[in-house]
Amino acid sequence: MFPKISNKTIKIKFFSKKFFIQNNIDKLDLSLFKEFDQKHFLIPKQTHSKNIFFSNSPGQIDNCDGVFTSNPRVVCFIKVADCMPIFFAHKSISFYGVVHAGWKGLTKGILKGTSIFFTEHKLKLNEIDIYIGPSIQKCCFEVSKDIIDKFPSWSIRPKKSGKFMVNLQKIAYEELKSIGFDKKRIKINSDCSFCKKNNYYSYRRDGEKTGRMIGVITSEA
Ligand SMILES: [Zn+2]
């Protein structure tokens, strides 16, 4: 399920429904993540913003939807239930992170912001491996007319009902390519969180009280 990426020290894990059964994310017990017990978590308090944050220290970051580090003792953490968890890792050095990107984050420009962030850290975009994890796909991500102009026309498929299906993974992929990331380094998981009820939580399917999947990325360097 997890992509091979160039930097062998990088570890990406996605905790799906089978593992993570606890609904209340605010009371998340980090001891669930036993394999990381020598490490520390960097956790964004997500708000569907375009804000990303770099830190070599653990902690919780307010109003933030992406966290990055170069400290192998830090685990970058994200929670999702339909939105895309997008993992980033430099091909050779210890520099990695994860972004929470739903349609709001995407249309606000979180990916462009991430690219600017890498450039500011003197890293080349074509040396970054990217993995888009399980999330709601074009089969199930439906929007109504009032927000349809936020999406590129090629990503939209109209339905007889008057609603529209939108391909968020393709929007992310095309944007990542166009801002300078290498398409050969972008991997996309094809699982739809809405369709695969046994595997994943889905906000769209189950409503606000649904659980969340957890994505983490760290280094074993
Ligand atoms: Zn689906």
Image: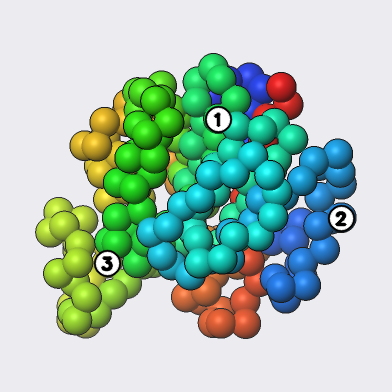
Left or right: 194 as drawn, with respect to 105: right
Residue identifier under label 1: 95
Residue 39 or 212: which is nearer the viewer? 39
Residue identifier under label 2: 31
Q: Quadrant of the C terminus?
A: top right
Q: Amino acid at mark 1?
A: Phe
Label 3 within 8 A of ligand 1 by Cβ: no
Residue 117 or 112: which is nearer the viewer? 117
Q: Amino acid at mark 2?
A: Ser
Residue placed at 16% from the left, 57% from the top? 152
Which tag is nearer the camera, tag 3 or tag 2? 2
Alpha-carbon span between mark 1 and mark 3: 35 Å
Residue 22: image quadrant is bottom right
Residue 201 screen position, x and y as percent: 60, 67
Q: Looking at the image, do the residues carrying marks 3 and 2 touch, with CB atoms under 8 Å apart? A: no
Left or right: 166 as drawn, with respect to 72: left
Residue 165: assigned label: 3
Q: Is residue 210 visible?
A: yes
Mark 1 and mark 2 lie on one chain; the one further toward the N terminus is 2
Looking at the rendered structure, the secondary structure element under dot 1 is: loop
| Residue count near mark 1 (Cα–Cα under 10 Å), binned few <14, some 14–19, many ≥20 | many
Looking at the rendered structure, the secondary structure element under dot 3 is: strand
Q: Is residue 206 above or below residue 44?
A: below
Alpha-carbon span between mark 3 and mark 2: 39 Å
